[in-house]
Image: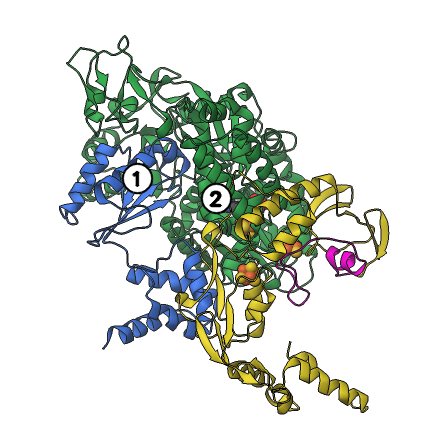
Amino acid sequence: MSEISQIKSETLKIAQKYLPERRFLLAILQDIQRHYNYLPAEAMKTVAQYLNVPLVKVCGMATFYKAFSLTPKGKYIIKVCDGTACHIKGSLNLLSEIETILGIEPGETTADGLFSLETVACIGACGLAPVAVINDEYHGNLTPASLRQILQQYQGGIEDAK
Amino acid sequence: MQNKKTIFVCCGTGCQASGSMKIYQTMQKIISKLDLDVEVVADIKKTGCHGLCQKGPLVHITPQEITYIHVKTTDVQEIIERSIIKDEVIDRLLYFDKQQNAKIQSKNDWSFEKKQFRIALRHCGCIANDSIDDYIAKGGYQALEKVLKTMTPQEVIDEIRKSSLRGRGGGGFLTGLKWSFAAKAQGDIKYVICNGDEGDPGAFMDRSIMEGDPHTVLEGMAICGYAIGANRAFLYIRDEYGLAVENMKKAIADAHARGVMGQNIFGSGFAFDAEVVRGGGAFVCGEETSLIHSIEGSTGEPTSKPPFPANQGLWGKPTIINNVETWANVPVIISKGADWFASIGSEKSKGTKVFALVGKINNTGLVEVPMGIKLREIIFDIGGGIEKKRKFKAVQTGGPSGGCIPESKLDLPIDYDSLIAEGSMMGSGGMIVIDDRTCMVEFARYYLKFLSEESCGKCVPCREGIKSMLKILNDICEGKGQEGDIELLEEIGSMVKANSLCGLGKTAPNPVLSNIKNFRDEFEAHIKDKRCPAGVCKNLTKLYIDQEACIGCGLCAKSCPTAAISGEKKQPHVLDEAKCINCNSCRERCAVDAIRVH
Amino acid sequence: MQIIINGKTYAANPGEKILDVARRNGIEIPTLCHSEALPGLASCRLCMVEVHENGRTQYVASCTYPVADGMEVFTNSEMIAARRKILLALYNLIAPDSARIKGLLARYHVEPFDRLEADPDSKCILCGLCVKACEELGTNAISTLNRGTKKKIGTAFNEPAADCIGCGSCAIICPTQAIEMTEAEGNRTIWEKTFELLRCRDCGEYFTTPESLEHVRKKLGETVGNIEELQLCNYCKTKRAATRLKDGLHLDEYLDSDK
Ligand SMILES: Cc1cc2nc3c(=O)[nH]c(=O)nc-3n(C[C@H](O)[C@H](O)[C@H](O)COP(=O)(O)O)c2cc1C
Ligand code: SF4
Ligand code: SF4
Ligand code: FES
């Protein structure tokens, strides 16, 4: 099966968990995002057809909500909390440290596809501010130095070490 | 079984972030291993947030009432051996209360807890968050039963009106009044919505309630459904709140299984059903018309009011939207009565409010206090004062829609109206404590940057006004501020507030305007002297080490990422300005405050 | 029902908006996003007025705020004028070349900001009229994309608009002429897609695209009385109708249906 027709059939399977009603557009896109880590164009076309919603409106949704990305994300998604508590405890310094080490800004992915960087609003762990979450693993009370160490572990391929 | 011991492991997000799931798993493993030869049965319950997240993971044991903080997996064996089997207290794991200057056995006696009064958070941390049995054992769903069996819809609305409950989502609109509009609106299909979008970047109380006590929200919504004649409900929950979504879905399923949701509830003929809608990640979707469009499957762009949702909401039908915390108050008001509720709080703001007390404060966490409590009590009695004994500067409330309350207003009684009078807002209840190391210009810039990304972009005052104001603030923070900037910010700001379409734009300039009002000198220092007094704006900061104060411990040098600090042990150190990138790491580390700002 | 505008009393009908009553009576309220055919956008925020109602003073968008008996409206208070100036100065930053914006700046004596630089490449004020027009037609070839300060109008994946029928409604309705539509040698290019143009049966001028014609035909289905009329430009259509009127024939709905 070609890649395109595979995406089509996979997407259709995801979409068909919901009735073909406009109100499920957000939920279906969320499931697709979760499945692929981004929204492939072909998938968006399939959903547009399934729900009978104009394609351009699907694009509007996909670019309006922060949950979606139109390009593939990295293997590790670094979410630096820039909630208010983390902000006043130095989350900007964490971001500039990441930029120094990995050369990416929020919203970008490293060329090797290993890391994506995002900022998130409060994740409710203010007691540990500043906080970053790397693929669901929380790291609290960070300093630029401790963050550097953590990133090095991921660069060394620690995915199984956790 | 009498005196059955129960271990509560806090599994709120804060505690999970510090590893409470591992504690829970280890605890379970050891308990089941010992099961055969030990007589004590321990029940480990996953509970929602206790509030004091900073001290997590928290473990609480009943009936002895022992609370342990910062528990590690290596402590688990000892806790079971000593506290469960032998009834001993492990001193090492107790909380040291600075105000009382003693180690305290039970969380109930922490100073952090003493001035609190819990209604919305009443169950969080003391019932299993995934058990409908626990909720029912604590009297859950009795309010719904009372309403369905003994009250008319009008009586329910009257009771809520009499309680003077105001919406906890920010605006503080009278809940009972809003319900009466929807009740009067024509139409046989009506809807109830729970606003669980919680977009304020400094608040997390709604998440705790949804995670820790999902049934109270459902019960509140069902009561409203009966009162206004709605049979269907939607809970719009931030998708990032995975645990809240999961617990809420399970709660709905369990409620169906128990017959407290579905057809013919309590034999009354009343039917009610709810479903969860995951939010797409947009602050503006907390705004009610925007949230409605999002549920309908569109982009979350607000539309003009009127028509108000109570008359024309979801799919054009009369719709009641309330905040999570508002819903959590409803069953209690019905059970304990409007008079009881109205006896708590201040004259025009009744009941309690949950605040997320965070920032430069000793005790970080969720606190629920009666309305009208003084700011000073929250910050110093409950919060234990400013971290590292620094100087209190201000407290920010209302998040991106609010403003700062300066030190001179520490004795302000906190309620909806007093905060608005100060140019701030209750908002969703974020309370960020700020010390002298926070730059008020940069802080205003932070919120505006947030809003520039979160504005839906539909209307020009908000989109372009925020963009222009942000441009000016960026300039000021980079040292490119000009004479007249402050006045221009004020002018644009007041237009944006007046002309914007929705609440986001109407409040967006608040953080800037309030900081200008209270800390104008800091803005002027940036613009005229090209100096950031707090040492935050990198272009305007020069650090140096006070040679008198430095004790030569070397901590600063170790923390510096660019090796800009050097010196002999026990000798005053020096900082090389050329290498310094102003990250402030050294300043945070120095125990004697020897690193200063020029 | 009556309302008072700037001290004078006017008749109003339930369901009307303040702007409707003002316009009918020649009272000036500036607007950018309002179109009688596509009301309700309320995005330009230029039409703000002060309303005194039930003892409360509110500042509202006159294009969407419904009239109520006895309400008092002010369209030109000092406050309104001051805020309008600031707002128009912001418009000048995003559409500095637009004739409509220039006219408004002159009309209301607005000094442009010298502290903030206008973007010479920017034309669109994101009023949303074009999207609404395209939606109303049922073509849905364009939409708003992104949000906040990055918001823009565009096509799916920013590619040449697949669903566009080249009718040009968006370009015509745009208050700032931000949508590029060029016509040359019998072709029309819009949204990076080029269409062949048809000539009017009567006068021979180019007037529309075959895709637009097909769209209208499909939409009207069986009800269309005279296919031939569709193949006329607006001018000739009116001319024929006028002739028919003169001949005592009835002017039919299809005259409006091609809006
Ligand atoms: C930009 C914006 C964001 C909002 N975010 C939230 C939110 O996250 N949660 C919430 O409950 N209300 C939020 N609100 C308030 C809601 O619009 C609405 O007033 C509230 O949900 C009503 O419930 P209440 O009366 O119980 O407070 C927001 C309002 C605006 C304008
Ligand atoms: S005020 Fe801001 S968020 Fe609200 S409609 Fe206007 S642009 Fe959108
Ligand atoms: S292109 Fe024109 S009509 Fe469309 S949103 Fe921009 S200004 Fe309005
Ligand atoms: S005419 Fe644009 S907001 Fe009213």
Q: Along the horizontal axis of the image, is A81 left or right of B314? A: left
What residue is shown at x 41% (from left), y 62% (from top)? A27
Q: Which residue is more in the foreground, B312 or B518?
A: B518
User: Does the magenta portion include C31?
Assistant: yes
The tint of chain C in the picture is: yellow
How far is mark 1 from mark 2, CA to CA?
A: 19 Å
Q: Which residue is more in the foreground, B517 or C155?
A: C155
Residue, far left:
A156
Mark 2 residue element: helix
Going by the numbered disc 2, the residue's amino acid type is Leu
Q: Quadrant of the C terminus of chain B?
A: top left
In the picture shown, does residue B522 fall above or below B56? above
Q: Position of residue B148 (x, y in %)?
A: 60, 54
Q: Which residues are magenta?
A: C14-42
Going by the numbered disc 1, the residue's amino acid type is Leu
User: The numbered mark 1 sits on a residue in which chain?
Assistant: A
Q: Dividing the picture into quarters, in which one does residue B352 lie?
A: top right
Numbered tag placed on residue A118 in the rendering:
none
Q: Which residue is more in the foreground, A61 or B488?
A: B488
Numbered tag placed on residue A95 in the rendering:
1
In the picture shown, does residue C39 fall above or below B159? below
Q: Quadrant of the N terminus of chain B?
A: top left
The tint of chain B in the picture is: green
Numbered tag placed on residue B451 in the rendering:
2
What residue is shown at x 40% (from left), y 32% (from top)? B478
Mark 1 residue element: helix
Q: Position of residue B137 (x, y in %)?
A: 44, 44
The tint of chain A in the picture is: blue
Tell me if residue B364 can be seen.
yes
Label 1 packing within 10 angstroms: few (<14), some (14-19), many (20+): many
In the picture shown, does residue B337 fall above or below B65? below
Q: Along the horizontal axis of the image, is C15 left or right of B34? A: right
